[in-house]
Amino acid sequence: MQEVSNTQYFDEVQKEQEIDVKHVVDSIYEALSEKGYNPVNQIVGYVMSGDPTYITSHKGARSLIMRVERDEIIEYLLEDYIANHFN
């Protein structure tokens, strides 16, 4: 029988590797361009609706974009815009 009066200590949990949002946006943009879509329109459609069918499955782009939250994409794009226009 296991001793229940002592607190168990879990040494370390391996965190899921953080996804680089810049890499995701760059990859999605490239895949959409290669397939002949307007990347800006398609990404906006996805961010506004959450519908992954706005993103092509070419080069795994659709599954890649679903690995980041839509608000993270907006945050990245806004930070990049501000950094390039106000500094």
Image (cartoon, rainbow, N blue to C red):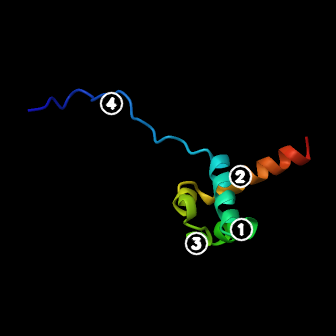
Marks 2 and 1 sit apart, C-alpha to C-alpha, by 13 Å
Q: Which residue is label 4 attached to?
A: 10
Secondary element at tag 3: loop
- Give the structural element (helix, strand or loop) at label 4: loop
Mark 4, mark 2: which one is toward the viewer? Answer: 2
Q: How many marks?
A: 4
Task: Give the side of residue 75 with respect to residue 58, left or right.
Answer: right
Looking at the figure, which quarter contains the N terminus? Answer: top left
Q: Which residue is mark 1?
A: 44
Residue occupied by mark 3: 51
Position of residue 6 in the picture relative to residue 60 (left or right): left
Q: Is residue 39 left or right of residue 14?
A: right
x then y, percent, for residue 39: 72, 65
Query: What kind of residue is marked 2?
Result: Glu
Along the polypeptide, which appears first: circle 4 or circle 3? 4
Residue appearing at x 71%, y 50% in the figure: 76
Q: CA distance from mark 2 to mark 3?
A: 19 Å
Look at discs 4 and 1 and give the one toward the viewer.
1
- Viewer-proximal residue, 60 or 77? 60
- Say if 2 sits above or below 38 in the image: above
